[in-house]
Amino acid sequence: MPINGDLLLLLKSNMLGEGEPDLGEKLLKSFLEQLFESESLPIRIICMNSGIFLSTSGSPVEEILMKFQAAGSQIYSCSTCLNYYNRADKLIVGEASNMKETVAAMLKFSKILAP
C-alpha cells in the first residue's frame, strides 16, 4: 500500500459523526477500512480527545490500526488525553505524543482528513 507523505489523519473522537454511539463506531470502522483499501494511506495518524480509545486496549479498530502501522503509517496519541482518561498504560498501537508535535504536524502536512 502506498503511503501519502502529505496526508495526516486526525481522529478526534472514537466515533464518526454525532448521534448514536453504536452507529458512530460502525461508521468510523468502515471509514478506516475503506481508507486502508484506498491508494493513499496517511503517513501519520493522530488520536486525540476520545479518539485515544481507538489506540488503547479495548479498541474496536485495533486490527485496522495495526494494519496501518504495519504498512508504514505513524500513529500517535495525545499524552494529555491518555492521562486525562487514565489510559496511558493501555496504549496498544503507536506511541504517545504532545500538542507541540500535533500542531507542527497540522502545519506541515498539506492534506488533513478529520472525519
Image (cartoon, helix red, strand yellow):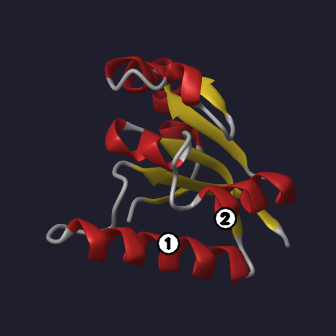
Pick the quarter of the image with the N terminus.
bottom right
Residue 88, image x, y percentages: 51, 21
Q: Which mark is residue 37?
A: none
Instruction: Farthest residue to the front: give it.
Output: 58
Looking at the rendered structure, the secondary structure element under dot 2 is helix
Up/down of 59 relative to 18, above or below: above
Instruction: Farthest residue to the left: give it.
Output: 19
Neighbor class of circle 1 (other Cα within 10 Å; few <14, some 14-19, many 20+) is: many
Callout 1–callout 2 Cβ contact below 8 Å:
yes
Q: Amino acid at mark 1?
A: Lys
Up/down of 2 relative to 61, above or below: below
Q: Quadrant of residue 67?
A: bottom right
Viewer-proximal residue among 112 and 48 = 48
Looking at the rendered structure, the secondary structure element under dot 1 is helix
Viewer-proximal residue among 98 and 66 = 66
Residue 113, image x, y percentages: 47, 62
Q: Is residue 1 left or right of residue 15?
A: right
Q: Amino acid at mark 2?
A: Ile
C-alpha distance separating marks 1 and 2: 8 Å
Q: Which residue is mark 2?
A: 64
Q: Is residue 59 left or right of residue 95?
A: left
Residue 57, image x, y percentages: 56, 41
| Residue ID at (33%, 42%) | 50
Q: Which mark is residue 29?
A: 1
| Residue ID at (32%, 20%) | 84
| Residue ID at (14%, 70%) | 19
The answer, for residue 59, to whether it is visible in the render is yes
Neighbor class of circle 2 (other Cα within 10 Å; few <14, some 14-19, many 20+) is: some
| Residue ID at (43%, 70%) | 28
The answer, for residue 97, to whether it is visible in the render is no
Q: Is residue 84 left or right of residue 83?
A: left
Pick the quarter of the image with the C terminus.
bottom left
